[in-house]
Image (cartoon, rainbow, N blue to C red):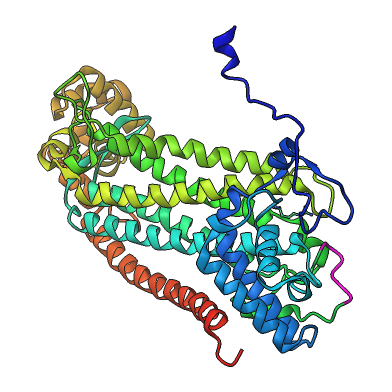
Amino acid sequence: MRARAKYIIPVPSSETVMTQNIIRKGRLTEFDEHASRFTSSVVTDAWLFYYDILVDLAHIRMLKTQAIIGQTTYKALKKSLLNIKERGYPQLPKDVDDVHVAIETALTSDVGTAQAGWLHVGRSRNDEVAACIRMAVRDALLVLKEAVLALQSTLLERAADNVHTLMPGFTHLQHAQPTTLGHHLLAHYDALERDLARLGNCYERTNRSPLGAAAFASTGWPLDRDSTASTLGFDGIIENSMDAVSTRDFVIEALATASNLMITLSRLAEELILWSTSEFGYVELDDKFASTSSIMPQKKNPDPLELIRAKTGTVVGALTASLVICKALPYSYNLDLQEVTPHLHQAMDTTVDCVRIADAVLRTIIINRDRLAEMTSVGFTTATELADTIARATHVPFRTAHTIVGEVVRIGTCDLDTIDRVGIKHVGKPLSLLGLTADDVIEALDVSHNVASRNVKGGPAGSEVARMIKTRRRLLHSRRRRLSLQQNALQRAEKDLLHESGA
Ligand code: ARG
């Protein structure tokens, strides 16, 4: 019984704290200490600290322009906010609701209520936190984009080195048809291309400012919403003030996008795990990205890849948690929304980490081309081409040719004699009499011929794969340029806000 007691979360006595709490002191008496810790987001808000400083700076700049505060107050507030930024998050009071109150509390101790008391005019934490989260998400999306582009570049280069590396392609994890490693890697590249497009779409809807919505009904102060939006590098505002504070759909979208991306990564990771087993032997991980066993000295384990596979669950879990938290919340703001933010933060960090590690593993992985070539024909992978060849040479319908080849595979000998014997059963005469030659059969069974003949758009033929690599190299280049334009726009806005002259 005693040992079990260790696992019970201690409920503190109802000692009280926070009598000096700047927002609480008018309406309420003291907060219960446990309730205070339970409701506070101050620990997880560390992620939002820097963004909140920027949001505060943009807000006071607009208050000054709108003549709501004077130049002296503006200067004092700005100086203190920059100091608070320099001192860092750990220096802020922790026994408060959240980062917003923590900053305002520090500001009040720095410059006094006569000036700090104007920071929150025409503003609520509801629009404030939504702005901070949107800024954090847009940064995370750009970092993710950069990581995805790097991984895509690695996939392209490895594909380019393996345009002619034969390998078996799988369906149902059974050998199916011959293909090339280049073609296979490009498939992962293209999946990432869609992930990248989704990141871009999500960015467009995320990069909108909710500021000026205040609690939900906006304000009677003459705020300029467009100005705070552009100061902070937003591409516009979330117009309806109630919508602006109520929604976390952009968070769900970011998490859904991250989940899709993680699923792409997990499939790549799973293949590399399989391919590095003794059964496959297609690849070997660089020692830098493998682990061993504490008891089995021979082991080389693909730990980073296993964790990519596992962390996909973590990210999908964050999406699921956020969906369920947001479901059926009445408008406008509810504190339930606070519970979403840590899931978002963890999921975005995890996803970036996974993309980067996948890139590093792939960049260094050793490819066993001989083994891939050896396995390419195992399991009658050329059977489809043989059926196609029979249909082409003899004009026997494809389905009949498919049945004949199926039976030949069952017999296990794939030569013209066997095909003729089986053919008589199904079409009444040997297929050699209908135009099938021994050379046709030999060619159909040749794995290189199989691949080379699959030259329809998007197929594995060397010419097609080379063409796809070329167009994707160009695409990658233009994606990189677009990303750096977005990064520069945000950097410019931030630099201007922090270092504006004449303030
Ligand atoms: N910590 C809160 C959050 O993350 C900030 C907004 C709080 N608003 C409120 N009315 N209590 O959502």
Specify the principal SS of the magenta part: loop
Query: Which of these two is toward me, 30 or 409?
Result: 30
What percent of the width, then of the height, locates residue 6? 56, 18
Residue 212, placed above or below residue 389: below
What percent of the width, then of the height, locates residue 59? 70, 76
Query: On the picture, is 1 further left or further right than 373?
Result: right
Query: On the picture, is 384 further left or further right than 111?
Result: left
Query: Which of these two is toward me, 448 or 250?
Result: 250
State yes or no: residue 432 in magenta. Answer: no
What percent of the width, then of the height, locates residue 68? 80, 83
Residue 397 visible in this rendered orientation of the protein: no
Query: Which of these two is toward me, 100 or 405?
Result: 100
Q: Who's the residue at 18% across and 52% down the image?
A: 162
Residue 41, placed above or below residue 386: below
**Quarter holding the N terminus?**
top right
Give the number of callouts.
0
Q: Quadrant of residue 285?
A: top left
**Quarter holding the C terminus?**
bottom right
State yes or no: residue 216 in magenta. Answer: yes
Query: Which of these two is toward me, 387 or 65?
Result: 65
Query: On the picture, is 446 further left or further right than 359?
Result: left
Q: Quadrant of residue 238?
A: bottom right
Q: Who's the residue at 70% across and 30% down the image?
A: 12
| Magenta-tinted stretch | 215-220
Q: Residue furthest bottom?
A: 502
Q: Who's the residue at 37% across and 62% down the image?
A: 149
